[in-house]
Image: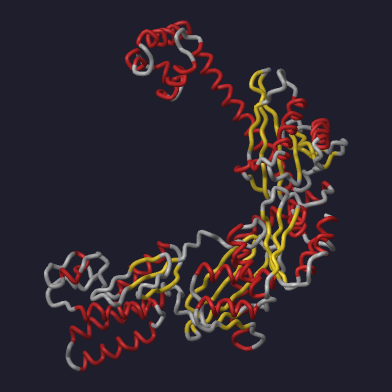
Amino acid sequence: MENLREKSLALPQLPGVYIMMDKSGKVIYVGKAKQLKNRVGSYFSGVHDIKTYALVEKIADFDVIIANSEFEALVLENSLIKHHMPKYNIRLRDDKGYQFIRVDLKQEYPVFTIARKQEKDGALYLGPYGNRSVTREAIETVCKALQIPTCGKDFAKIAGKERPCLHYHIGACRAYCQKGATAAEYRESIEAAVDIFHGKTAALIEKFTKEMDEAAENLSFELAAEKRDRLRAVQLLEQKQLVIAGSMADTDVAGFFRGPVKSCFTVLHYVDGNLISKDFELFDTPLEDDPDAMSGIVRQYYEKRGVLPKTICLPFATPDSELLEKLFTEIAGRRVTILIPQRGDKLKLVETANINAREETERVSTKEEKALKTLEWLQNALKLPNLSARIEAYDVSNTGASDIVASMTVFVRGRPYKKDYRRFKIKSVQRPDDYSSMKEVIQRRMARHSEADSKFAELPDLLLVDGGATHAAAVRAELIAAGVDLPVFGMVKDSKHKTRALMSPDGEEIGITGNPAAFALIGTIQEETHRFAVEYHRTLRSKNTIKSKLDEIEGVGEKRRNDLLKSFGSLKAISKADVEELSKVVPKNVAEKIYGHFNNEKGDTL
């Protein structure tokens, strides 16, 4: 750490980007700075919160790129984050799946389709919307209300030549394929739909109301009834608020709430002062302070959407608000204004957005907050230097001297992280010896870590073993020999095989029964680790049983054994097969021996 601090002191007081790397050379964080020397140096001096401390602990080296201006640093930071996807940078969801509704009004009979992005093809793009199903529902709902066909027929070719289908008879389509229907009527419906997608329902309602009244005055009751039906359909859409804000939003109001585990960024979309929808993103609470975090979140959010409003109201100033305004203006090709309201109606809108962000955060983070409090309790009870965000647990399973195995389970923030589970087949121990078996496992695990094996790259904050002080001491000795300093505790069971306490390598017992949440967590970890070990042991024993049963039969070697298992799936299926079925896999004489072996074996059992 001292060498990194000294390296940071040699940096210039210039704007630029800094790139933090772990010992494998992987980029784990990218940031920008107005003055590189001050910003980078702050990581290697002073006191940090838990999240920043976790980042600093992983930094093995850093690099910097000096920029000509703060704006250039902002753009460069964006580019590097997209390229490296660093672990500790804010990352909004990748699966949002924003969609656009596309309609080419130059066509005689335009149709609404779904597009993933806007193209420069002269078509009109509406949105963005949520996922594909939401977008399709919006199209179908509006088309049904205005009786626009969704059958996909080419009306330019078939207009006036076909009979109406079922959709016409159930009132879902005006049958533009039948005689008498005109392209002008079709276009009128399409334009009305576009108005709805643009949020102009009030103007459309006024238009239909006027046309309905005029038709009634002229005694055109059929036309009046048609306008009435359309009017009701649009009014219903307006009440249900099914159309989501898109390119028509002229003002976005952002809100932010920072939770201990999860945080939320929410955006309220307004058109002409009317709220038309809400959008929000939940993500892991960032290590940056709120102004810096807001800058990164806003950039990611609008980059994914691809559409910017005229005005964006933020809940507080960011250190680069003016730069963001310049960046968004360049992206939009028109002026985009960023405001930080201090009073009046816009401040009330921001407060509303903040409340929405808080509600969304509290809705999803209750379980994670409980887990975090449990881990904080363990940190204090075990006198650990760090929060045990990542816990590894080990157990050994054997029956006699055969198939001795061990398991490694991983819990991240109190929840099983099965992606990192690992299994070990003990090689150096030929008889039941839990201490020696555990030593081998730790040796192999740490060796793989030192070899920069990606599957064992991340070390835990806390290591647990099934057993007492002796087991914990044996593991600690292996860690010291490997040059690794990690807290180790044994998980001790009572007479009923339930987790009772944690035991230090020095024999100090830490009771956990007084804290139900900690008791449940450690109990779950111990049971899961035992289950994973036993499951592996049974799998190996079952495979060996199958091998030994088939190896007893003359003419069945490794290849034929594997062919039989591949064909029949199990030893039981092989034992029930007749000679003809077996002959499809092995020679007939061998098939007869297999059949005879299992049938004789069954007879002996009887």
Q: Which residue is pictured at 47% across the width and 62% down the height?
A: 97
Q: Which residue is pictured at 80% across the width and 62% down the height?
A: 8
Q: Is residue 205 left or right of residue 318?
A: left
Q: Is residue 479 above or below residue 69?
A: above
Q: Quadrant of the N terminus?
A: bottom right
Q: Is residue 271 left or right of residue 521?
A: left
- How many marks the image carries: the answer is 0
Q: How is the image coloured?
A: secondary structure
Q: Nearer the viewer, residue 327 or 605?
A: 327
Residue 273 location (% of width, % of height): 50, 85
Q: Nearer the viewer, residue 480 or 218?
A: 480
Residue 480, picture quadrant:
top right
Residue 386 location (% of width, % of height): 79, 52
Q: Is residue 213 left or right of residue 2?
A: left
Residue 219, picture quadrant:
bottom left
Q: Is residue 583 above or below residue 320?
A: above
Q: Is residue 338 left or right of residue 426?
A: left
Residue 435 location (% of width, % of height): 77, 27
Q: Which residue is pictured at 81% across the width and 39% down the height?
A: 483
The residue positioned farthest toward the bottom in the image shown? 217
Q: Nearer the viewer, residue 245 or 494?
A: 245
Residue 120 location (% of width, % of height): 39, 73
Q: Is residue 275 above or below residue 364?
A: below
Q: Which residue is pictured at 68% across the width and 64% down the height?
A: 259
Residue 497, picture quadrant:
top right
